[in-house]
Image (cartoon, grey):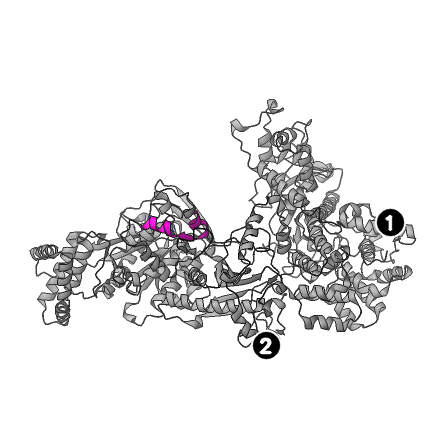
Amino acid sequence: MLLGSAGTGKTSLKHSLMEEPFNPHTTSTIVSDVSSVRPFGHEWQTMRGNKWREATEEDEIEELKHLFESSFSRPFSRHASVLSTQYSHDESVSTYIAYDLNVESCIQSILERVGSTYKTTQSLIQPFLHIWDCGGQPMFLEILPAFLTPRTMFLLLFDASKDFRERWQSRQNTPDGEMLFGEVVNESTSDLMAKWMSTIHSHLVKHNKDSTSSPNLYCIGTRGDKLDKKGKKEVKKQIQFLYEEKEFSDLIKDVLIIDNTTSGKGEEDPSITVLRRAVDNFISKLVVRTPVNWVLFRKVVFQELKQNVITIVPEVLKFYHELGAVLYYPQIEGLKNKVILSPKWFVDTIGKVFTLEGCEEGWGGTRRWYLLRNKGILVQPLYQEVWQSSGIDPEEIMELLVYFRLAAQVQTELYDSRFKQYFLPAVLPGYTGDPNEVRPGYKLRASPVHITFSTGYVPPGFFTRLATAVATNDNVKLNIDYVYAAPVIRSKSIYRNRVCFSYGHPSDDFVLTDINEAIQVDVLRYVPESSHPVSLKLVCQKIMKLLEECCQQVEDTLNGHHADQSSRKVQYVCQCSPSKEVHYINDISAVKQTCSDPVYCKMKRRPRSLTSNESIWFNEERKGDLKLLQKIPTLKDDNNTKPTNQNVNSAKNYPPTQTSESNDDQQKVILTIRNLVDVIRVLEQGYFQNKKWRKLGLYLGLIHPELKTIEDNYPRDAERCLEECLAKWLTEDIEATWEKLAIAAGEVGEISVAEYISGAQELGWGSNLRSGKSIHLLEKKKLLLSGLLQSLCCLKTKEEEVFTLEGCEKGINWLELLQSKGILVQPLYQEVWQSSCVDPEDIIELLVHFRLAAQVQIDPYASRFKQYFLPAVLQGYAGDPNEVRPGYKLRASPVHITFSTGYVPPGFFTRLATTVATNANVKLNIDNNDYAAPAIHSKSIYRNRVCFSYGHPSDDFVLTDINEAIHIDVLRYVPESSHSVPFQTVCQKIITLLDACCQQVEDTLILYHGHHADRSSRRIQYVCQCKRSKEVHYIQDIDTEKQTNSDPVVYCKMERISRSLTDEESVWFKQKTKEISQEKQPEQIPPLKVIDDDDAKQTIQRVKSTTNHPSTEISERSNDQHKVLNIKNLVDIIRALKKDSFSTNKWRKLGLYLGLIYDDLNTIEDNHPRDNERCLQECLAKWLKGGFEATWDKLAIAVGEVEET
């Protein structure tokens, strides 16, 4: 049996074994979409001489001759007695078969031909091999277990020229030589190989009591012509490393790397010869002494009768079923009296549905085919039409699919209820998105649960069978893009590896997702708990019981009722916040665990309480709840089903612009304890009533004892109780979102606050919108921007489609200018958008507002027209980020702008490029080769790499998005003596410019994406130029403000050694001056402008305007206001606050607005209880020492935030 992913060369290997010439245009055995090629090829093969070839009828006759000769020449041998006994036992059967089928003449003819060739000479046994060339598409991995037998040699093929860790993509070779690529799955080659081997081991070894018929498996690496001898050894070592500790590794007999291109030539690849010899050895161990009449039976029934199905079932059929010669299923009621003589025919028949091949034979645009392709629903009229000419009742084929749990009978509203409907998830495409993404709008969500397996991954075929088993439950209904009390879902919910169900009530969803390592279970409720007759806790426990039963049924199906329950385990995903890595609660029992019992985190190994999301899975220690488990209503009794469906249908009629995407954005942005100050600020700006803190906590999911503790700790202090309540929520709920906060605020009657939360999150903090009228404004702009960029990116450069516009007579191709340089010229956008019902200038203004475009002026091109730079429409740069145009005289060491996320935020780089391009000192360097340098070898403007000139065309600086950071290079192309400005000054000005531009981009992203821009998450890192390591690393803890180019010591992060700055590094830092060396005097406190009432009002306005336009306000502040403070300024700050009568009891709130985290403030309060003055001092000290870039300006803003204007 040839196994492996699609396109690995299984068919070519079969030809190599038969010494046929290599054909580079071999057609794939199975096509991922519509094709006439069948999923399995099944041929009779034999060997004559030393060459394999297809068997003929003469070979069959000769084989019968040898069997006759063996039986009659040694009548006293053990073998002869077995033959004689068996023959006499089966003689009546054979006679009955001959009589019933009227084939006496056929048998007589065969015996005569055997007699005419009968000789007494001995010859070698010529075995008949049944070669199965299996399709490698994911759907056929699902049905493989139905055809596995122990008398098999498996050849598992993989592409040895590819990385084992690379995500796998199916490949199809078409008859005309073209190569097509199918879906990309979330599995690597090593994952798929492990699944194949685990399946074989589980079905044929683990539960097989007959050790004499264990299978052999060889791992065959194809495309050996692309590897040298060393590469082949590396592949073998890698396979050994990957699988040697696995239980199935004993199956592997050898790993061979072969070159199919040598087949049929003079010098065949030695590995093919080794493989052919291995097959010979396997055959010699499996030679079966076959009764003569069994062979006669096979010859008569299989070769002479031109039928695919017979209704007579002799004893011998079980034997031939094991050999793979027939398919015989006596355990299936509809097939117990039938034998499938041609497995290939049967698989071809099923394949018409599984490969959607049947729709190619007729019109495939019907709703029947649409339901199968997109929903996995096979309706009765369709399968009857496809299988009507198969010679077997279509209902019996469906019975076989249901028996192997490849299909489940369901009832949906998608088709006429008079006809049967079956759910076949294996025919659907795979899901490759985030397993945690669900349809928005839920009110409650349980923490994820994983069903894990001892193999380390989900067994092949297990998930789709689990889905069909679950679908048959009376309380379960397939959730095929239904919506209940939530926005319209934007993606379908049914895939081959991800299925969404409703349980008991359409408002309760549970989603099963195959994430390779485990099956993830998510349970969600889309109505408030108070509106549902049954608690979510009881529903979750009922679902887990159902899944346990269904998993057992699937194991019975896959393993032939030899299920090993210990290999499967339910694991509860730990919701502790410190680790992003998925890990589980340690040694937890769903039966014994209660909500109040402590649990242990596998990662931290420390006890803690269950979170509100985790506790849903466990009992409350109340016996009454157990009785309620039986009262969950079924879908058939639900009175709300019909109205719900009507609501769904009406929702789908709304235009896209009426559907706000803000819920999706809010749900994806997870809030943590670091967002506490943002949450408090939004509630304050929305005028939330603090006295409702307790009710808000309940709707956020906090339990009563937690709220009671908060109230006891801070009696009659509603503001502090609200803070503690929100902190508790942000700490425990790992999926805290703005949407959840808005929903909770609405539940407690604060509707205006809920609307404000949605609007503020969407339009930027501090915008002070007091109504919900503008909530959809930004979404409409986003949709418009998406369409505009798409229209620009999709323009073609064909000659007949080049716009005939003013300026083209000068030889300027506006379209080529846009696509190659990123320059959009006024005549082009006016032509493109003239019919858009919006003034093109307004559209451009919108693009500029969101920093997707920047107005520039490129001298050579039509200066009388407006020109805009749009880097987003350009191609990406994939070269070396350190490569620059040659001829430079000076080059600074690279500088990186890094982010706390570990990568450059999406959309950040292109907006930074457009922001920089608007600076008066900056000019786009678009392949400018005119100034004292050789011609540049490649263009300098890409989507992720832009070259500018700063101040003078001889000074370049290049920005490159290298994914992990933004890479900055500064170069000078003339000698230093020829330039009026020192190179060092230019470098420092560029860094200052980039810092200001980055801040502007962050402010824009707040508005556009609803993200909270944290300036501290961005950092400038200086790439270390030491020669000790080739790996990119940074100078340790360097302060641009304090560092000078003459400071004797900097530290390498890689080696942790001190050294001096190199010449290339020193240009980034100031020269040491007398003023710097003498800077020991206490700083003078700058006036804070908050003394009289008029100034106080101005400060309030300034604080609010700063929230809206930080970059504008920062540029207007004085140097002293923006100068970074340190711990030496503590006494100055305390003196200033005292002078202006700051209320020390507001120290905690001030700390929050200064950026201190909740835990730090708790520690200060615990260390100095009831001492507000000391707490204020410690709070300020923490701020000054904590790396917050403390300034007088920030202090003034924070003071204003706590209403100390």
Percent position of residue 515, x then y = 49, 60
Q: Residues within 10 Å of mark 1 (few under 14, many from 20)?
A: few
Q: Residue at x 57, y 67 (%)?
A: 534
Q: Which residues are magenta?
A: 370-387
Q: Which residue is mark 1?
A: 1098
Q: Which residue is mark 2?
A: 622
Q: Nearer the viewer, residue 585 or 372?
A: 372
Q: Report whether 1135 appears left or right of 1153.
A: right
Rendered image quadrant of residue 1165: bottom right
Q: Reply above or below: 1183 against 430.
A: below
Secondary element type, mark 2: loop
Q: Nearer the viewer, residue 87 or 1089?
A: 87
Q: Nearer the viewer, residue 467 or 1033?
A: 467
Task: Please say whether residue 548 is visible from this viewpoint.
Answer: yes
Task: Please say whether residue 166 is visible from this viewpoint.
Answer: no
Q: Residue at x 57, y 63 (%)?
A: 581
Percent position of residue 685, x then y = 77, 55
Tell me the quadrant of the picture where the N terminus can be found.
bottom left
Whether label 1 touches label 2, CB < 8 Å: no
Q: Reply above or below: 835 against 298.
A: above
| Residue 473 shown in magenta | no
Question: For the residue marked with disc 2, what is the amino acid?
Answer: Arg
Q: Report whether 167 appears left or right of 281.
A: right
Q: Residues within 10 Å of mark 2 (few under 14, many from 20)?
A: few
Percent position of residue 538, x then y = 55, 69
Rendered image quadrant of residue 44: bottom left
Q: Residue furthest top?
A: 809
Question: For the residue marked with disc 1, what is the amino acid?
Answer: Gln
Rendered image quadrant of residue 61: bottom left
Real-space CA distance between mark 1 and mark 2, rounded to the nearest whole angstrom:
60 Å
Q: Earlier in the sequence, mark 1 or mark 2?
A: 2
